[in-house]
Image: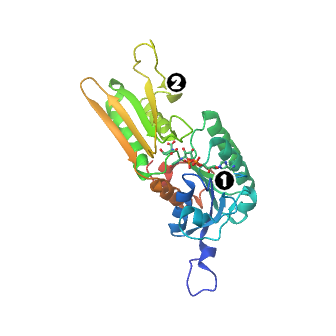
Amino acid sequence: MLYSPDSNVTKESFMLKIAVTGAAGRMGGHLIKAVTDAEGITLAAAIERPGHPMVGQDAGILAGCGALNVLISDQLEASLKAVDVLIDFTFPDVTLANAEICAKVKTNMVIGSTGFTPEQRQQLADTTGNIAVMLAPNMSVGVNACFKLLKEAANILGDGFDVEVVELHHNKKKDSPSGTAVRMGEVVADALGRDYNKVANYHREGMCGERTKEEIGMQTVRGGDIVGEHTVYFIGMGERIEITHRAMSREMFSRGAARACQWIKDKAPGMYDMQDVLDLK
Ligand SMILES: NC(=O)C1=CN([C@@H]2O[C@H](COP(=O)(O)OP(=O)(O)OC[C@H]3O[C@@H](n4cnc5c(N)ncnc54)[C@H](O)[C@@H]3O)[C@@H](O)[C@H]2O)C=CC1
Ligand SMILES: O=C(O)C1=N[C@H](C(=O)O)C[C@H](O)C1
């Protein structure tokens, strides 16, 4: 049934109801605003950790978009009663705990948290077998286009070029390398027929020897307020290709998350990523 202004039901009852965890974090306010601004979805709940000073405050005031009459809660399960999709941008341990609750109450998830170990990614998939989950280290259109460009570049250049990934982020970031950098390394390794977990080299110091042909160097810079920059270098003899993405704000991450909520609402249980949402596979 489509919404009609002449009917006696409210527009809100036709909207997809969204909850945001990590509501008071760097991404939280952007996510609340993006959900409020997007067509067809509405903010139904905003959750922070118990003891956070913003618990009890209006989520819209926190996000700078005016009062929304949604108070920040520290009770996820109770908050999910009237929610269709949870957006979670927190940390791996928190996301895993939240995923158990979502699976219990059958709420689909859009997850932006990064820093998962391969075992934690598997645990997430095992925990959420009865719901649809979109897990992506980066929800910007530009980065997801870069993933495709990187695959193409690696396919063309093959083993003749050394690959190095360098990422820069703000000084409050907790995980390293970034989830996006890891995914970039994985995309290139897959295209070159290598196992990322075997060829990623995170550390060079002292007499560590010559670079191997197979390794993919993963370098990290942290400082100030850098939102996020990623460069993959393909370095050959006498020439070099650099594919760079620079994030100038956090808004496109949150717009991507809002778009993913619409996309995931009627998907079958399973794990998806942003390439599925953007139809880039
Ligand atoms: N996928 C993407 O496009 C992007 C992903 N990220 C990732 O999102 C995550 C969060 O990043 P930021 O917002 O910068 O971090 P942040 O530290 O500013 O925010 C995290 C928030 O989660 C809250 N939190 C902790 N435990 C909680 C719980 N049990 N329930 C509810 N909230 C809880 C914290 O109090 C904090 O406010 C990181 O893993 C980051 O790498 C960040 C930007 C884009
Ligand atoms: O923590 C951040 O800020 C970001 N994290 C994501 C990542 O780890 O890839 C995405 C973006 O670069 C910002």
Q: Which residue is mark 1?
A: 131
What residue lies at 41% left-to-right and 39% top-to-bottom? Answer: 230
Q: Which residue is mark 2?
A: 198
Residue at 46% across, 27% down: 194
Q: Nearer the viewer, residue 257 or 230?
A: 230
Question: Looking at the picture, how far across and down is residue 10, in whole percent?
Answer: 62, 80
Q: Nearer the viewer, mark 1 or mark 2?
A: 2
How many residues crowd around disc 1 within 10 Å: few (fewer than 14), some, or many (20 or more)? Answer: many
Residue visible at 61% across and 75% down in the picture: 12
Residue type beneath disc 2 = Lys
Task: Report the quarter where the N terminus lies.
Answer: bottom right
Query: Horizontally, is 54 left or right of 104 in the view?
Result: left
Residue 38 visible in the picture:
no
Question: On the rendered structure, is 224 left or right of 75?
Answer: left
* Position of residue 272 measured from the top left corner of the image (x, y, whole percent): 56, 49
Residue 250 appears left or right of 155: right
Asked if the residue at label 1 sits under 8 Å from ligand 1, the reply is no
Given the image, on which type of amino acid does mark 1 rest?
A: Ile
Residue 104 placement (x, y as % from top left): 75, 53
Packing grade of label 2 (10 A; few <14, some 14-19, many >=20) is few
Callout 1: helix, strand or loop? loop
Residue 163 vertical placement versus 67 (above, below) = above
